[in-house]
Structure formats: structure tokens, C-alpha cells
Image (cartoon, rainbow, N blue to C red):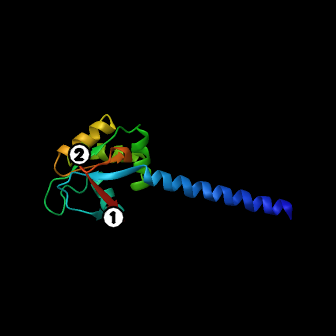
Amino acid sequence: MRKQNTNYFCILLISIFFVITDVKAENHYRIVTHPDVNEVSITKNYLRAIFSMRLRTWPNGLVIKVFVLPDDNPLHHRFSKEQLSLFPYQLRQSWDRLVFSGTGQAPITVASDEEMYNRIKNTPGAIGYLDTSYIDDEIHVLQIK
């Protein structure tokens, strides 16, 4: 009986760990846009279409400018996996196909969170993702449904 209680306790601890880890990961960054973007929330499919470069304009006609961090950046990796359900290399392959076929463009890669913040803040129609420590009233946080 004592061994069975220990097993239940271990399973409970592991479950709590995964829940806490998931909550921390979701709260560590936000999807952000330029303040001119009127959208309050979008679906994950809509977000995936934007970052796959298949959607080129916002519903209000504003051209979408996508900004991303380098493929090897930990935040880019988390964003790709959690929000788009894709590995960074899958995104890169998709972008490369668009560029090499002449049917589209790759997103603009920025070197740091600071550059991401400044580019989104100063580029109408811009979208990207930022660590929560960079969030302020100068940019718009987009809710993902």
C-alpha cells in the first residue's frame, strides 16, 4: 500500500511540473503588433498563415510586415513550437520555397529583442513576438484564440 501511495505522489508531482512549465512558457512572451493594427485577437490558424507568409494584408488593408528572431534563438524556437506547431527549420524551408520560387518573401530577421521592439513600434502593419519584459504601451499585444 505504501509503495502505491508513493507512485501516486510521484505522478502528481510530475503532472504539476508539466502544468507549471506550460503556464510559464505561455506567459514568457507575447505576440505583438504595431498600434495601427486594429485586430484584438486572432486564431492560431490565422497566426500560422501570417508567419508562413501566406497572408499579406490585415483586414483593414494594411500590409503585414513580419519580424522574427534568428532560427537558433530560444524565443524563436519556443514561439514556433508553441504558437505555430512547427519547428524553426520547417518555417525556414517554407520561407526558402517562397523566395526561391519567386512567389513570396521571407520575414525580416532581427538580431535582438531590442531591435524587434523598435521595428514593430516603428513599422505600420508589423507583427512579431517579444519577451514580456519588453511589453509597454508603445506596442499592441495580440490575443491568440
* Residue pictured at 14% horizontal, 62% vertical: 60
- Residue 85 sits in quarter: bottom left
Local secondary structure at mark 2 = helix
The answer to which of marks 2 and 1 sits earlier in the sequence is: 1
Examine the rendering and report whether any part of residue 11 can be seen. Answer: yes
**Element carrying mark 1:** loop
* 99 in relation to 142, above or below: above
Residue 10 is situated, as x and y percent measured from the top left of the image, at: 72, 56
Q: Which circle, 2 or 1, is nearer the viewer?
A: 2
Number of marks in the image? 2
Image-quadrant location for residue 118? top left
Q: Is residue 14 left or right of residue 75?
A: right
Label 1 amino acid?
Thr
Please name the residue that numbered disc 1 is placed on: 43
| Within-10-Å neighbours for mark 1: few <14, some 14–19, many 20+ | few
Q: Which residue is mark 2?
A: 120
For this orientation, the residue located farthest to the right is: 1
**Residue 31 appears left or right of 122:** right
Quadrant the N terminus occupies: bottom right
Within 10 Å of disc 2 (Cα), the crowding (few <14, some 14-19, many 20+) is many
Task: Judge by depth and name the residue closer to the eye, 63 or 18.
Answer: 18
Q: Which residue appears at 23% of the width and 62% of the height?
A: 39
Could you tell me if residue 105 is visible in this image? no
As drawn, is 107 to the left or to the right of 76?
Answer: left
Give how far across and how far down residue 26 sits, in percent.
Answer: 44, 54
**Residue type at the position of mark 2:** Ile
Query: Viewer-proximal residue, 128 or 77?
Result: 128
